[in-house]
Amino acid sequence: MAATGDEAAAMDSISREPASLPAALDVAGGSSSGSPAEHPEAEAENPVIAPKKTGVNSDGGVETAEEAVEPAEPDINELCSDMFEKMAIFLQGELTATCEDYSLLENMNKLTSLKYMEMKDISINISRNLQDLNNKYASLQPYLDQINKIEEQVTSLEQAAYKLDAYSKKLEARFKKLEKR
């Protein structure tokens, strides 16, 4: 079924590029900017919209519409170059972000390496100090053994002193007993 009247006009306006419509109206309407002869590039890019001719067919008054004229295609080279420029900007941004991520990661690795080197130095110092303490303890061990022996001797001497004290008290008690007789 063929589109007629308003339907054909609506379909034609849909198929046109929106940017070329005001220029075509400007050229057709004769605005104050000048005649189409002054702007040949505008005339080449935006063809004048031909009015629709509707006719009455002898087959019962059915209106017919002419085929819609396709608007001129925009310059593909210009669109391609625009697309490539925008793609280059996008890729440049992506690469810049990736490079910044890598430099940040590199800086973090350097700082981590420095921290681990500091921790290594600290652990080496602790190990060295522990070894020194172990050596000092080993050198003091004979003296500690002597102290333990002296302590044992003092304990046995103390026991002997208690026994002697107890014996002397018994002896004193006997002596007083014998003296009273």
Image: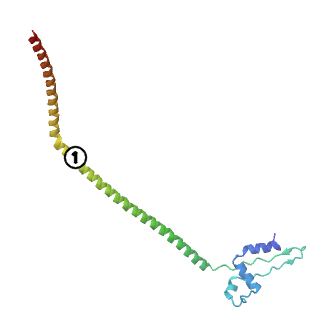
State the residue lying farthest toward the top.
181
Position in image of residue 4 (x %, y %): 83, 73
Front in this rendered view, residue 161 or 101: 161
Q: Quadrant of residue 33?
A: bottom right
Question: With 133 as the anchor, is 97 left or right in this view?
Answer: right
Q: Quadrant of residue 17?
A: bottom right
Q: Quadrant of the C terminus?
A: top left
Please tell me whether mark 1 sits on a helix, a strand or a loop: helix
* Image location (x, y in percent) of residue 62: 87, 73
Q: Which residue is mark 1?
A: 133
Q: Is 122 placed above or below 86 here?
A: above
Residue drawn 68% across and 83% down? 45
Report the amino acid beneath label 1: Leu
Nearer to us in this view, 40 or 104:
104
Residue 75 lies left or right of residue 170; in this view the side is right
Q: Residue at x 14, y 18 (%)?
A: 169
